Image (cartoon, coloured by chain):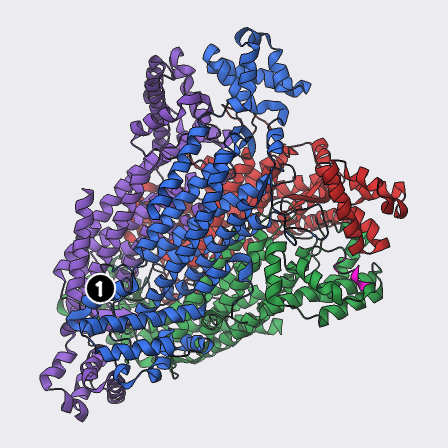
Chain colours: A purple, B red, C blue, D green
Amino acid sequence: MSDPRDALYCTESMAAVWSPAVHVSQLLAFEAALARAEAHVGVIPHAAADAINAACTTTPVDIALLYRQAAQAGTLVIPLLDALRPHIAEAGRTFLHWGATSQDAIDTALMLQSRTGLDLLDADLRRLAEVCATLAEQHRTTLMAGRTLLQQALPISLGLKAARWLGLLTRQIQALHNQRQQLAVQFGGAAGTLATLGSNGMRVAEILATELELVLPDLPWHAERDRVASLASVLGITAGAMAKIAQDLVLLAQTEVGEVSEGSAIGKGGSSAMPHKHNPVDAIFALSAAKLAIGQVPIIIGAMTHEHERAAGSWQAEWQALPDLFRYTSGAVARVADAVTNLQIDAARMRANLDLNHGLLMSESLTMALATQMGRPTAQRLVQEIIRRVLASGNTFQQAAQADPQIQALLSTEALEQALDPAGYLGSTEQLIDRALAGHRAVVVKQD
Amino acid sequence: MSDPRDALYCTESMAAVWSPAVHVSQLLAFEAALARAEAHVGVIPHAAADAINAACTTTPVDIALLYRQAAQAGTLVIPLLDALRPHIAEAGRTFLHWGATSQDAIDTALMLQSRTGLDLLDADLRRLAEVCATLAEQHRTTLMAGRTLLQQALPISLGLKAARWLGLLTRQIQALHNQRQQLAVQFGGAAGTLATLGSNGMRVAEILATELELVLPDLPWHAERDRVASLASVLGITAGAMAKIAQDLVLLAQTEVGEVSEGSAIGKGGSSAMPHKHNPVDAIFALSAAKLAIGQVPIIIGAMTHEHERAAGSWQAEWQALPDLFRYTSGAVARVADAVTNLQIDAARMRANLDLNHGLLMSESLTMALATQMGRPTAQRLVQEIIRRVLASGNTFQQAAQADPQIQALLSTEALEQALDPAGYLGSTEQLIDRALAGHRAVVVKQD
Amino acid sequence: MSDPRDALYCTESMAAVWSPAVHVSQLLAFEAALARAEAHVGVIPHAAADAINAACTTTPVDIALLYRQAAQAGTLVIPLLDALRPHIAEAGRTFLHWGATSQDAIDTALMLQSRTGLDLLDADLRRLAEVCATLAEQHRTTLMAGRTLLQQALPISLGLKAARWLGLLTRQIQALHNQRQQLAVQFGGAAGTLATLGSNGMRVAEILATELELVLPDLPWHAERDRVASLASVLGITAGAMAKIAQDLVLLAQTEVGEVSEGSAIGKGGSSAMPHKHNPVDAIFALSAAKLAIGQVPIIIGAMTHEHERAAGSWQAEWQALPDLFRYTSGAVARVADAVTNLQIDAARMRANLDLNHGLLMSESLTMALATQMGRPTAQRLVQEIIRRVLASGNTFQQAAQADPQIQALLSTEALEQALDPAGYLGSTEQLIDRALAGHRAVVVKQD
Amino acid sequence: MSDPRDALYCTESMAAVWSPAVHVSQLLAFEAALARAEAHVGVIPHAAADAINAACTTTPVDIALLYRQAAQAGTLVIPLLDALRPHIAEAGRTFLHWGATSQDAIDTALMLQSRTGLDLLDADLRRLAEVCATLAEQHRTTLMAGRTLLQQALPISLGLKAARWLGLLTRQIQALHNQRQQLAVQFGGAAGTLATLGSNGMRVAEILATELELVLPDLPWHAERDRVASLASVLGITAGAMAKIAQDLVLLAQTEVGEVSEGSAIGKGGSSAMPHKHNPVDAIFALSAAKLAIGQVPIIIGAMTHEHERAAGSWQAEWQALPDLFRYTSGAVARVADAVTNLQIDAARMRANLDLNHGLLMSESLTMALATQMGRPTAQRLVQEIIRRVLASGNTFQQAAQADPQIQALLSTEALEQALDPAGYLGSTEQLIDRALAGHRAVVVKQD
């Protein structure tokens, strides 16, 4: 019953988590846990709980029919309980769903699915972070152009670029982890008062939360959706982080840049008409999955205006938007992970690209070398004059600098060479890489 | 292979239009039509076209496998052609997809599906418009409160409310119709130059458009997505129109208002725990489907930044967002159509609600009746004084007005009664209803 | 130079925080702090730092001119430094902005402004939370209808409704506080390597962060915008929380519900044409400000695809969207705070509304009372039968229930009365209120 | 009172159109025209109309105060009328705003401002389209790489790229023009019935529309916002079109591509630290303005759920979002117009870039040349084999092709050269340019 389209934007495992069948199974898990909790507190007989538990694990459910009925009933839970009831032994039938409302079951099921979904994302993000950590370590001094506004600015190292991706990933791992720790059970009954349970409501709620290993919130949250909106925005931001990395990869893979390409596999990224093309397919699908994921966030934040004790329309939109958000985010993460893991790196091209534009990339370095001696404004003016000569003559920056008498007077040949050597102008690059690696280790250790 | 969740937010027929299988069938329709067009122009042999047409209609396709391959290849078309080729007689094999690029096939297929999708929406909108037209006609003088900022303001008629819905619907029918007339074939080859076809490109394009009954655009639109964004926004606005009507219904159905309810059917809108509740389920799902639909629009407009001659990520997001937009819009329209068609109207409650708040709803009417004689500012002050007395005493507005000597001096008993009769303060209501009905008829006639 | 429109959607103090003049002053604060930090580390002379500090506090800036120049230069910092330089004593001029890039100054200034902005929001949210806490306490047992899907469902108390608002507010206060703790200095130099500072980069960064009382991040975050996106989404969710409360108020203020109204003041919420109307103006503007605020969030999350080491377009959009998000959120919070603070509560109308619909609101209560004796399915069927009689006869639910022989047999008169008394069917309401109050106190205490 | 920030994202003239002062002047224009129309129909005395007209043109208004009052009153119109009234001669005072509601004035004013706004956009778009038309004509055969998924695909000409921009612009000019033709007066009175005007409502409406040169709609549209949403989406799509062109420019201006740069001016796009950098500032601000513009669209479409006869919150959000949308769109259009007008084109670099990647860009051309003789599959395999040799040897594609015996057998030297000449593989480029130019002329002529 899975949708073939999932293959494009979604991992198989995440698609499975959010399948209708799994959703229904989690609704049943809620009903069973509720019965156990109520029996524990003494609200319903243990025999009733046993009967309900048995039915929840054995009743066959016609998923497609259930959704069609839900379209009329307003929620899945009403027809699901109707389907379940005949399978419950007499003693338990009365006590099914005792004191609960449909939204209790549905929201709790969504949180249980979210937990699994977050675990899947966590695993893929960690896999990706490991690869970035390795890149950061191995390419500490692999020189490449730092680019601002898509213009070459100063030299950096590939290791630093990977370290910045790593820092970004580390923060997402942490943020998703925080969300996981806050996933809360929903239990309030028809109007959030747990009226049916008299004075036993909170005790049942407590044990229910324990049973399901979810947080017990201060209050039901039927109509206060900041929890869902917060989860959604963390997912959307994770998708945005993937888009940033994927965008970098697509830009680096341009024909005219050629510094990376995605690993080839049969049937991967080729073009029937243009055999020379090798499209960065993983990065491209990561970008599209991220766009789709990010697009779900405003649906959920925008739907926070739940009316009174339960919403008429806003809640029902979450049922689709939250699963889709998880699904698309999984695709974005997995695709970036695949792209980075199999990345082909052309360090020679990276180095060669630094010499484009006559080597002018090193002009700030030279300016700085001169600035300590002649003040920055004067140094800037001098370097700008040399740049003009470079552009007029077609010489390299180095040639023009060497030929300038003022520079000759101020800098020795070695000093000039050093000022023009990209490897010597990396500033705090090593320390920054160290900080990113340490930050990553701290998160990994803390959570394991 | 259909998704059970479609039952909640989508019509069955619209889900079918956007199924993977139909998408693939439309890709094949493109390839077949292309071959016919090229044979017609003499670019490829007629025998080749026949062989390709035959294969396009008979080759069995493993849809799920195809999507998995597409995830690697970058588009569905590459593996689809691979699957097709062995089934094409030798003479035609070479000429499959001749001169085209994947995006030509995919965009054209999406436009063919859009055409069917627009036809389905058109039918449901017309059905809904007919019902609104009937309501407008039948309830020309069924009095109810006009409400602004959710406060009762002045009397209107239910017919006028329906007429305003009708006007809204008429404009959407027209806007969708305009979109349908503009659906364009996509045909540009790998970089939009139709390079493979030498000097025959435009002739092939012309015949291809004719074959598929699509518009021939001035230029390929691989990377200029205003057409798609325009289609998307019209769909989103249609969904927004549905949300407006659905929101009105939900508000009118409130326990405290009670002027309408959705028709009951077994299993419809009930609550297991609260048998007195009758939820407006159709309107609620219309609202959620509309929220989901509207949420897709910024994904598509936001993805207009297609890079150069074909996009890396933005285009691929459309494949999911545009179908979802059609699907959710269909759900919104169908649900509103169902809700309005089966609407239970409580005209007595509508009339009774006009008397809430001591009958103060008629205060503008009285102000206006007095204003012609004493000037509006003075009239306003007098009426405000009477309102104060009403609120202090608990009397009705009529009682307080009748007791006021100034009013007694200016208005006869009949004149006062008339000034306080909601039926007499409907202004241009009848004419406005006529205009809405005429506007509706004009669109229906023009398009049939 | 403030925009008159701010009066509608924004507090005066928040408008001031995000004024161009304050932004420029924070840019200068960055430049001054940077000079101090660099002098501290020994990278520049103390005299230079002193000269720069002096100029940063005394140089007059033509703000309007500066923005026009920025439109050409690409950032405010370039023309600002040009304007500043002539005012710096010779010794310092060279060392202005030493090692920094425009984005270092701008992002840091935005974080400094965000800190003030968060403090303003915190104060208003705390004020609002206090009022809600008082309402929760005072109206623990003020009965009103709990409404789900805008249908009356079960009785709740106004105190519980306020407690749920309080819980929502408490979480937003906490979330904004967490953001405040994470505001990070930006300092990376032209390509994020701090190349100009050689081996001193990280020490300067550390002291700069201390000077400005901002967090020192692991790495510069020029192009990794999860921090900004996270801040934006927390603001958007706060706005969404305001929309939820405001929506509740608007719905409760409907003519047909009439349970609350906004406090009157001269010129507040009246209608010239309709003197009986009293519009909930604060809630309405809160809703519109929230819509505007939430609308900025996807701009920021969607702009996370910053290219390489600095973005071409995405970053520049944040300059407008983040300030607007703060501004609109402030309006939403302040307007809700005003509305709730001045709320007129009509407890009698709340109680009276519970009897609408023949008192059927208590049907679940009766069902539950009967269910323990005859099983819930049987009880449900019996109660539904009684509801049918109520709707046919026009009797009240109580009358119909008392007349039923089965109920007479099972429930004593007192038991029936109790089952039909809303005050007796509030379940865990008191405990839930206690939990909300305790949660609120914990956050207030922790942060003070 | 203008905001300095406007300089970054907005044209000065568009900022002026949407200034508070102009908005108020258009509110006054509405009130004056209404009085004239009502006098014409005989609903109010001519003397009253004269008095009102006089006051509307001479009364000084404290704009800042007015907005503060509006924040309490709910709309600008209430305090504006209060400010106006003392300045109206006695005879007219009563008849000010006769039969109208605040929303009539505000919506009509917004439409009048929109008309001017659309005219400004039209002028800038036409200016830009002219430049693109010239580029298309002049660079018909200036060779450059066509790039798909940011990989070089096939040769195109710069003229074709400009022609595609032109086609995009032509459609936006047309779409904005269509919107302009549909701008409608708003006139319905307090609940949309024109109740105050008795039987004269529609005649007044008709003359009012004529006075203001706006369309008379079938019905008031206080709560049916498809007109506004449609206007908003056309603006957003225009902004999206600008983003597409700006994105192309930024990509072409990359250091590694270097095919275009923005014209230099003093203070334009430079970098103090990096004198070699020349940032494409216009394109970058166009991108950010477009992001901001597009971000307003979902606010407006999402706010279509206006409740009943007038909205509580959704309408009030339009007051800010629609002006901002116009403002940002103007910035996007003007910045792209500036960028393209002053574009520095490096045709030599364009040609040189075609030879990157060993000349493999011509592989489809060779495949096609071979395909007619050996079938496409075989030709593809052969060309892929040659590509492998190229990548292994470092030779050019031409060298490897010439050395292949199979190719030698099938293609003469001239035929091979022709197959490898980019200028010979432009397909329908010239015709497509002609079509774009013709489409542009048709729109320009039709509208002038």
Q: Which corner quadrant holds the C terminus of chain A?
A: top left
For residue C270, side relative to residue B65 (left or right): right
Looking at the image, residue C214 lies above or below residue C438: below
Q: Position of residue B397 (x, y in %)?
A: 77, 40
Q: Is residue D94 magenta?
A: yes
Q: Which residue is mark 1?
A: C206
Total marks in image: 1
Q: Position of residue B105 (x, y in %)?
A: 40, 54
Amino acid type, callout 1 = Glu
**Front-lying residue, B104 or D408:** B104
Q: Is residue D151 visible?
A: yes
Residue furthest to the bottom in view is A405
Looking at the image, residue A37 lies above or below residue D57: above
Q: Is residue B204 visible?
A: no
Q: Is residue A18 magenta?
A: no
Please identify the quarter of the rendering in which residue B123 is found.
top right
Numbered range of the magenta stretch: D92-98
Looking at the image, residue A239 lies above or below residue B58: below
Chain holding disc 1: C
Q: Secondary structure at mark 1?
A: helix
Looking at the image, residue A361 lies above or below residue B407: below
